[in-house]
Amino acid sequence: MGALPKQRITRARQGLRRQHLRLKAPHLMVCPQCREMKRQHHVCPTCGYYAGRQVVEIEVRERRSNPN
């Protein structure tokens, strides 16, 4: 038989123990090329630049006009 707790752990104590397990928002910064928000140390998804040079060719989507 395994170990059993002597007392019930309250929700507050349980939350204090688990407070580092929460989801964290990604760290964002402004892209120096296009001024859009991007993740740090990642290629900009809007313009394809990283560290001052273009590393990914971004396709420009054409917007379809609404026939209505």
Image (cartoon, rainbow, N blue to C red):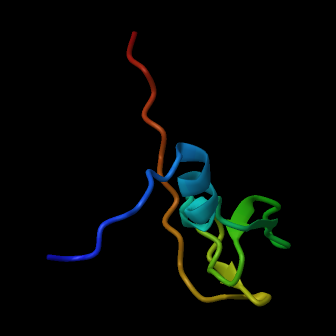
Q: Residue furthest front?
A: 6
Position in image of residue 21 (x %, y %) = 54, 65
User: Could you tell whether 33 is left or right of 44 in the image?
Assistant: right
Decide which of 26, 20 is in the foreground and name it.
Answer: 20
Q: Residue furthest top?
A: 68
User: Could you tell whether 45 is left or right of 39 in the image?
Assistant: left
Q: Which quadrant would residue 34 be assigned to in this image?
A: bottom right
Which corner quadrant holds the N terminus? bottom left
Residue drawn where x is 69% and y is 84% of the image: 41
Using the image, determine if residue 36 lies above or below residue 39: above
Q: Which quadrant would residue 66 be assigned to in this image?
A: top left
Decide which of 56, 43 is in the foreground and name it.
Answer: 43
Residue drawn where x is 81% and y is 72% of the image: 33
User: Could you tell whether 17 is left or right of 66 in the image?
Assistant: right
Decide which of 64, 40 is in the foreground and name it.
Answer: 40
User: Could you tell whether 14 is left or right of 29 in the image?
Assistant: left
Decide which of 59, 10 is in the foreground and name it.
Answer: 10
Position in image of residue 39 (x %, y %) = 67, 70
Using the image, determine if residue 6 lies above or below residue 1: above
Residue drawn where x is 53% and y is 70% of the image: 58
Q: Which quadrant would residue 48 be assigned to in this image?
A: bottom right
Position in image of residue 15 (x %, y %) = 58, 53
